[in-house]
Image (tube, coloured by chain):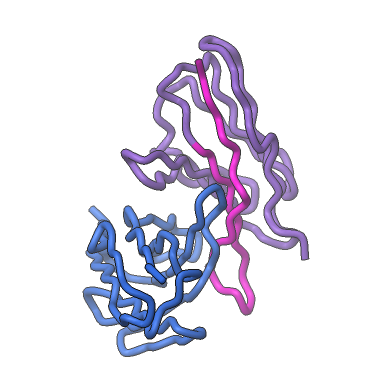
Amino acid sequence: EDQVTQSPEALRLQEGESSSLNCSYTVSGLRGLFWYRQDPGKGPEFLFTLYSAGEEKEKERLKATLTKKESFLHITAPKPEDSATYLCAVQAGASSASKIIFGSGTRLSIRP
Amino acid sequence: DAGVIQSPRHEVTEMGQEVTLRCKPISGHNSLFWYRQTMMRGLELLIYFNNNVPIDDSGMPEDRFSAKMPNASFSTLKIQPSEPRDSAVYFCASSGTGHSGNTIYFGEGSWLTVV
């Protein structure tokens, strides 16, 4: 069964303190791995898509990396506005119409 | 570009009543997803459509839940009869092909409370 596990469940950092969030997955035939940010009361907001091991994507203070078993979301010198829940999702299977399943998320809190 | 549009944003209803949630996907997208989010279970995929056809409804919790997509620009998720345990945020999302690949984009959600 396809599975996505995120860790830690919650992370509290001081402003400027860099860290990484983990997303490990077990799927047959990865088609894509996605990172989303979700603010309270809002829908998930798309950040990155990674398709193959070794791929990296960056956006401002965020960098996502991918291996054959896991993905990391690195946060460099975070600011309070980076506080949110970060969700990882995977799409697997032979078809581009395969379903996309989500991990339970990491709640990130950045203290000023 | 307009994003995924959901209505209503908030609904409070009594147990046993019928609830209908509506979704307009992003124009040109050919896949549509309904998710439910709760604190306990996170984001769960209920059902998804491709080219208006239901592909996988294995996440639909029980027969009280039904979803339709009569055309490429509209979908409904219906709960009849509703129960307090159905209280959650229901998200609609859509994805297409082209430069965005299979990335799915979410609406703002419909917050359902069943009392």
Residue B89 spot, x, y in % from top left:
51, 38
- Quadrant holding the C terminus of chain A: bottom left
Where is residue B1 shown, x and y percent of the image?
A: 77, 66
Q: Which residues are magenta?
A: B89-115
Residue B71 to residue B114: above or below: below
Would residue A71 be found to the left or right of residue A96 on screen?
left
Residue B39 found in image quarter = top left
Camera-side residue of B37 and A13: A13
Residue placed most toward the observer, A92 or B23: B23
Vertical placement of residue A72 versus B26, above or below: below
| Residue at 64% from the left image edge and 27% from the top image edge | B20
Chain the render paints purple:
B
User: What residue do we see at 43% from left, 45% from top?
Assistant: B45
Q: Is residue B71 above or below residue B12?
A: below
Task: Please indicate, yes or no, whether residue B59 appears anywhere in the rendered image.
Answer: yes
Task: Find out whether residue B33 is within the magenta segment.
Answer: no
In the figure, B67 relative to A94: above or below? above
Residue B11 in the image: state x and y as whole percent: 62, 27
Q: Which picture quadrant has residue A84?
A: bottom left
Residue found at x 55% / y 23%:
B79
Q: Residue at x 55, y 30 (%)?
A: B112
Q: Colour of chain A?
A: blue
Residue lying farthest to the front in this orientation: A112
Q: Position of residue A44 (x, y in %)?
A: 52, 58
